[in-house]
Image (spheres, helix red, strand yellow):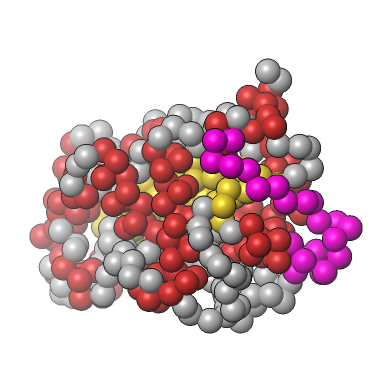
Amino acid sequence: MTSSQTSFNKPVVLSMGDPAGIGPEIIAQAFCERPGLMRQVVVAGDVTTLRRAMWWAAGSSLQSVPPLMWAELSELRDFSQVPPGCVAIIQACSLKQPVELGRISADAGEAAADCIRFAAQAALSGQARAVVTAPIHKEALAAAGVTFPGHTEMLQSLAATHQGIDVAELPVRMMLSCPGLRTVLVSIHVSLQQALNAVSKAQVLQTLRITQAYFQLCGMAHPRIAVAGLNPHAGEGGLFGREEIEEIVPAVAQAVAEGIDCTGPHAPDTVFMRARQGAFDVVVAMYHDQGLIPVKLLGLEHGVNTTLGLPFVRTSPDHGTAFDLAGTGRASAASLLAALDAAISTSKCL
């Protein structure tokens, strides 16, 4: 077996995302821009939808479009049979016909969920070395009866079920990164009030442990972790709130006692700038928007979302479905390519 054949034994599985959004289009564009991905990545999606997307990605000119091949599930174990120049696709959902672009629908949500399940099961069963997920629409998922608010929670549940444990026994965290900045979130897709309630010593300490474990997995023995405060000026000694004193400081102290190189709480209005200037390797943010706003401001087009704590590597582009761009050929595949690069490089550490 040649080295190229060996690489197909455990490919990266890329889920299609919401078929009404730009997911299929940027997937097609990614393969057009990086033909070498055909030897490492298999798409879990809908063949007809992805064929349609190829037209948009190539400006309706088939001359520059790599042909698509539908590979059966059994072929996931050995892609040496995929002809050169072809994109390997698994029909991972049961769409009767391509959905209307730019519109929230239960059909689109169900198709996206089916593709996520397929990709996750491929990784959990050891058939795939990593999962990359194209953008989904949370309202479409809800319309399809999916109770998870996003990828992170759904993948966490699937992994916990596979391991036969409760979801609470498999804590995960979201890490957003762009060139110059990485941030890990204590809480994810919850209301702001719920996010404030989640700022506890236990949650912050757990986040620090998960962050440390991930970076050690990637070969960084002692990542420099900055912990952001919750309140303005990190509470200013209790003048603007006591969460720092009562919850965050004890968590940092315990983490330091465990050998984790972390400091804080730092003023949240400057800590991200300091990290970008090289003072820290990663910032632990207290809630979703606190961490995502600086990352998306600095580099949405190259942003990557990585789920820490799963038993497999999972990344995604750091943007949404962009319904207004679907079908126009104007969506950029840069963030998806960054997510694919991150998944491929991280999976080499396992």
Residue located 20% across and 76% down the image: 193
Q: In this view, does 167 lie to the left or right of 49?
A: left
Q: In which quarter of the image is residue 186?
A: bottom left
How far across and down, in percent of the image, does residue 278 sit?
50, 49
Residue located 70% across and 42% down the image: 38
Q: Which of 349 and 80 is in front in this view?
A: 80
How far across and down, in percent of the image, does residue 21 sit?
57, 72
Residue located 19% across and 62% down the image: 199
| Total numbered badges shown on the rendered structure | 0
Q: Quadrant of residue 220?
A: top left
Q: Is residue 310 in view?
A: yes
How far across and down, in percent of the image, does residue 339 sit?
56, 51
Q: Is residue 336 left or right of residue 120?
A: right
Q: Quadrant of the N terminus?
A: top right
Extreme residue toward the front, this view: 96
Give the magenta range: 54-75
Residue located 19% across and 54% down the image: 203
On whether residue 63 falls in the magenta region, the answer is: yes
On whether residue 62 falls in the magenta region, the answer is: yes
Q: Is residue 206 left or right of residue 19?
A: left
